[in-house]
Image (cartoon, coloured by chain):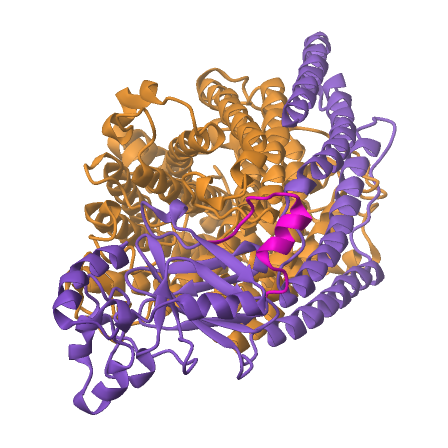
Amino acid sequence: MSTATSHAEEVHTHAHDHEHEHHELNFWTKYVFSTDHKTIAKQYLISGIIWAFIGGSLSIIFRLQLGFPEMQLDWLRPILGEWIDEGGKLDKEFYLALVTMHGTIMVFFVLTAGLSGTFSNFLIPLQIGARDMASGFINMLSYWFFFLSSAIMFSSLFIETGPASGGWVIYPPLSALPQAMPGSGLGMTLWLTAMTFFIVSSLMGGINYICTVINLRTRGMTFTKMPLTIWSFFFTAILGLLSFPVLLSAALLLIFDRSFGTSFYLSEIYIQGQALPNMGGSPILYQHLFWFLGHPEVYIVLLPALGMTSEIIATNSRKPIFGYRAMIGSMMGITVLAFIVWAHHMFVTGMNPFLGSVFMFLTLIIAVPSAVKAFNYITTLWKGNLIFTPAMLFSIGLVSLFISGGVTGIILGNSALDINLHDTYFVVAHFHLVMGAASFFGLMAGVYHWFPKMFGRMMNKTLGYIHFWFTFVGVYMVFFPMHYIGIAGFPRRYYSFTAVGNDGAAAFTDMNAFISIAAIITFTAQAIFAWNFFYSIFKGKKAPQNPWNSTTLEWTTPVNPGHGNWEGEIPAVYRWPYDYSKPGSDVDFIPQNVPFSATKSSNLPEEDAEIAKEKDIDGLLGAQNESYNR
Amino acid sequence: MFYLIGLLSVIFFALAINVISKSIKLNKSLAANENTGEALDSSNNANAYGMIIFWALGTIAGVWSFMVAKPDFLPIAASEHGLRTDSMFWVSMAVVTFAFFATNTLLLFFAFKYRYNKDRKATFYPVNHKLELIWTVIPAIVMAILVFTGWRTWRDITSQAPSDAVVIEITGHQFGWYVRYAGVDDNQLGNYNYKLIDETNNIGIDFTDKHSFDDFTATELHLPKGKPVLLKIHAQDVLHSVYLPFHRVKMDAVPGMPTKFWFTPNMSTDEMRAKLGKKDFNYKLNCTEICGRGHFGMAITVFVDEPEDYAKWCAEQKPFLATNPTYLAKVPDNLKAKASKYIPAEPVAVDSAAAPAAEAVSVN
């Protein structure tokens, strides 16, 4: 222990170095090519918000077509040009392009990059007590690969033949043959290029998240003391790391088929008066590869939302999260099962029906950990003392949407029932609720909750409430009625329902119009958020250090943490992150860095035993500092 | 009708805004308190009441919209397996609706009931293994039951088609469906090969196979009522998907990989017309896999006939070879005699003059 003083000095110099460095950063290294995880997180967040508005507006355009098939859209010509045909109608191929790009943007650019990119980057170092990511440089590269990917994807919206139009799943042969549709030409090439960079970006991010969580936890922060947010980011990163490369291989084979004459996915094709020479390929192979990513992807977008929500609900219920270990266990179960349920997207693709049976069993098993999570959330609210911050409202909204969208998964996961419902609006309603809206609510909850830490200012609460109620009601009004349209057998990705026949289209004219109006209102309400967000960055009320009276480490940093996060020593962690309203304590929350020896009145019997270990934890300080000075 | 829901929602919005604007006022008067750690303005209560209002109006809107939409759902299934999957669907739906309603109710009521009160302290309640065990096991049992019944149904639906099944081939292309029947003589489809496709023989029927000779094509799908039908499904260019909504039949059409689906239609077109009270009702075959510009319009009409009407209709159809005698040239010499049976016994000169006209018709 004799070296303790010198270590302290070292740290002091180190902290001083940081401050020194801080002054030297110019605009480019501070805001653009920054290696600070907090700046990178903000870059992801703002990119994600911009993408969300683009993706959302695309959906509004096709909702106009679906809700008001007779509407003259000439007024959109200044934006869409010749995608509005002479009759003032949306071009049929562009409709498909809109559907495709809406899906791609929302799933990958908003809910993967915008959600997990933002909060994994922001919260992992802050909540585990690290000065930054394991590799700040790779982290920076990760964002800039994402930016490159974004730029390419965005540019594809403006080319003459239109962006990729084969659905976000880009099933070949449609996506492989430029003669099948114009969007399969340059647009698809750009899509594949953009996604390749996207995958590179998300792998760099994922490796970093995993390394950081494993290696850079502060002294005392054992795995079982980690907040559920960190657990969820950790599982998410593992999911991404194992599944995104499979999408990359799927995309590479597709690139080969498109450009180099191979036949991985192509066989016996006669198109536009011409028999192609390709033989022996299988479009089903692509579907297997795609969904091997595609299904884990659902959890890649959902798990971070669930993790953050656990944190927010516990904080604002002033109660520990119910069943902390069960929550970890169910996330672990979901992570494992996520890899072995992919073929439930393929029950009626001609895949061997026996495989269908296997995947039905596995799929319905995943409902069990999901149900456990829902019950645990509800029990956390029970006998709490609930403070409805906007973040809390969005978290409760998430739980509701997660349940409402999740239960129909039990129906769709049943292969016999999927026969009729596959590729209908029932599916659209299901996944928009459970993964789209639920994850979006998680994203919003996260932004409202951690905004003070990000920008040192508060967002306006009242605007947050208004934003929440419009969005919550709006999302239900959009997606609840869609189930009915699905039960009536309406296929998705239909430009219009004229060929459904037997007055089917007429029967749901009103409902489609209703959905479109609800969608427009919901989308417009997001402007409230955008205004609140950008205004508050500059003009928001100054935030206190710990505005929500929360226990986790990020709130022990200064209001505006600099590079390195903590000015002095990184705090040690002695307890789990959910000591809210602990009996015997006169404060209603005990932060993680408060040792048990300081809270003798509220310790549980087994926690008194922990006091002995505090010395060991404190003894690790030297080693921890050394690891940063190497 | 649905505008009424719209109206309801407008009322809800108005209510919400009213509550919130009220809370803003109170909020402002309490603003001085805000940094004292009390979280605690009336907007907290307003949001709590919002949860209950949401629950109440949501329940009303949910039930009511279901009743309104119900008449437009797909009617009772017109196939034997469809009756099974339909009843299973509604049973599963009842189970999940119960779960949906119960959990959402608890969620929103707890949110309301346990809203912040400065005189109360939250209960420190981190874990209860018994409770967790119960709510792990119960969903697991319910799932197991649903999976088991689902699996049995799925197994039966995807089992081998009965050997006496009527075989019909459906080929998807951008943007339409070709239908080929096995013919009245041998009930066996001949081979096909995508390299044999031309403007007339747009399925690529292989005339070196003797089973092809009596095959005939049609632009609509006729099915015999009460008999098992085996659809053999192909695609020529990109993925398509055969969807017979009323028969609860769906199967992708995949280029290079033949797929199949067998089922037994149990209600004729006429019966369904009578049941629905719609004289012009017709079954449809739609495409449910995105395939390009014309995806949404890729439909043909389906007729389910009484077995005798079906037999009569089949007998009236002319084999492809009969309408396009020039394809006799593609038949190998040893089978020419068999194939010639299907060529109309008319003077050759007239026939060759008629051939282009026949082609023109069959292209459509």
Residue at 53% x, 28% y: name it: A513
Image quarter in which the N terminus of chain A is found: bottom right
- Magenta residues (range): B265-287
Query: Where residue A63 appears, x then y in whole percent?
Result: 46, 32
Is residue B284 magenta-colored? yes
Q: Is residue A150 left or right of residue B86?
A: left
Q: Nearer the viewer, residue B95 or A181?
A: A181
The image shows residue A421, relative to residue A61, as above or below, that is below
Q: In the displayed image of the protein, which residue is found farthest to the right? A: B119
Image-based side of A248 in relation to B46, left or right: left
Q: Which chain did the renderer colour purple? A: B
Residue in the picture at 35% in, 74% down = B215
A451 with respect to A161 (left or right):
right
Tally of numbered tags: 0
From the viewer's perspective, is B219 left or right of A560? left
Magenta stretch containing residue A417, yes or no? Answer: no
Q: Residue B6 in the image: state x and y as whole percent.
A: 64, 23
Question: Dividing the image into 4 quarters, which one contains the C terminus of chain A?
Answer: bottom left
Q: Relative to residue A280, is residue A240 depicted above or below? A: above
Q: Is residue A339 visible?
A: no
Q: Is residue A491 above or below residue B222?
A: above
The residue nearer to you, when weighing A568 against B91, is B91
Q: Residue at x 14, y 72 (%)?
A: B348
> Camera-side residue: A494 or A440?
A494
Nearest the eye: B206 or A533: B206
Q: Which chain is orange?
A: A
- In the image, residue A31 lies at what x, y percent? 31, 32
Query: Looking at the picture, does residue A21 appear above or below residue A492?
Result: above
Question: Is residue B126 something that shows in the picture?
Answer: yes
Q: Would you identify the image quadrant in which residue B155 lies?
A: bottom right
Rendering quarter of residue A599: top right
